[in-house]
Amino acid sequence: MDSTKVPSRADQQLIGHAREHGFAVTGKQLSGWRRHGLLPANAHGGGLGRGQGSTSQPVAASFVLVLALARLSGRGKRPADVAMLLFGEGLPVPEPTVRAAFHSAVGAVGLPGGAEPGRDVDGQLDAVDSYIGHGGQAVIMVPARARRVDAQIVAFFESAGVPWPPTELAQWDKNLGAERMTPQGAALFAADALLTGSAPLQRIGALLRGLTPGLEVNPIASLVETTPHSPVLGPDDSLAMLTGDVRRILHELAATASPEDLGAAWQTARDVRAWALDLCTRAEEELAARAPGEATMEWWISRQLPAGLSLLDELRTRHERAAATALSALGLLLQREQFAELDRVQPGCQWDLAQTPGFLPPPARAFLALPPAARPAADPEPLGPAAGPGTDRGRLPAR
């Protein structure tokens, strides 16, 4: 539609509808939204007769979409981000536009230093290593806000004469003195995992130790590092449930997942972020009042378990971004698929562990639809002194 032309009668209906709800919308904006696939074309209504042309009417979805677009669109906002925000609100944005937006989020995932995608894996990793070695920016493993909460927990217990971490933890770490991953090493590890879809357990353990810099012992890292070989591990004891570049798999999910699954994953990703930020705020408030309680304990347990990865990831991002939410949503869909595949390859996994507080972010548990537990589920226990992380209960694959 030529922006210099008078809006059609159908578009005038949409403009009037927006005005009635307090929004100023122009024909040029309507044209731009349609060009980006955010607003459906008007429906042909038949001819007027006697050479007077034809009529058209806005489709029903356009009336609700034009209000949302007027509210969400603005200078500097990418159409793909607007599409995902519309979708996240459950609005009838065209499905091809939604899928294209998810694809764009995956396509924006790059490697440090801009390693060339056309090179082989070793070449790309060499480029990343060179970039980091020459002072390129490494990853932020533990954001400042999380470090402050960790430090306040240590300070509180030390002021009360209680050694922290408890000395009893040492007996559960069978790999004391193992490597702690540095931010530079974490950047290279992440690049390797992205390009190959696999990660050696020893490197995963080193990452977990690097993510808890104030913890001299780390029973959970020890469990990962000492996990016996199983059918789900590669010859080099790598956790290799995927093959090749993970971005390819995420693109496939963006293309094939049902709109219902994409929507549920999007909402779960948002809920995980809300949980992480709320938990951090509540723990800060308890510690400021020198009364650590439920939130502080949940923080401490989560920091040692897989839920802590989501916790740190959300705290690294100051403002919510649509593309980041889309990637988290696709990651949740992939995780759900991998849990199902793991249960197929090695039946009898101790899935009841996933219900342990701190193992997964609470909003993710229902979405991931975990397979039935290998044994009758007991009341959830935190992985701490009472749960015995050094025992079989601390291992996911059944022995």
Image (cartoon, rainbow, N blue to C red):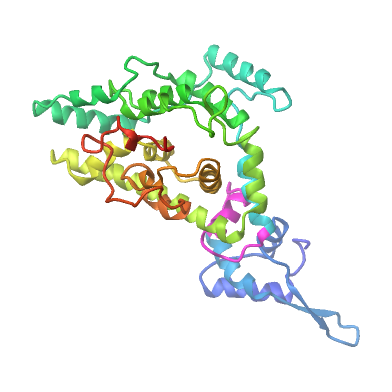
Asked if residue 270 lies in the magenta stretch, the reply is no
The residue drawn where x is 54% and y is 75% is 20
Q: Is residue 259 visible?
A: yes
Identify the magenta region: 72-95
Quadrant for the N terminus, please: bottom right
Q: Position of residue 352 (x, y in %)?
A: 37, 47
Image quadrant assignment for residue 56 = bottom right
The residue at the far left in this view is 161
Asked if residue 74 lies in the magenta stretch, the reply is yes
Q: In the image, is 161 to the left or to the right of 170?
A: left
Q: Position of residue 307 (x, y in %)?
A: 38, 40
**Front residue (pair 106, 244):** 244
From what the image shows, is residue 360 above or below residue 8?
A: above
Quadrant for the C terminus, please: top left
Q: In the image, is 203 to the left or to the right of 67?
A: left
Q: In the image, is 309 to the left or to the right of 334?
A: left
The residue drawn where x is 65% and y is 64% is 26
Q: Is residue 15 visible?
A: no
Q: Position of residue 393 (x, y in %)?
A: 33, 38
The residue drawn where x is 24% and y is 28% is 151
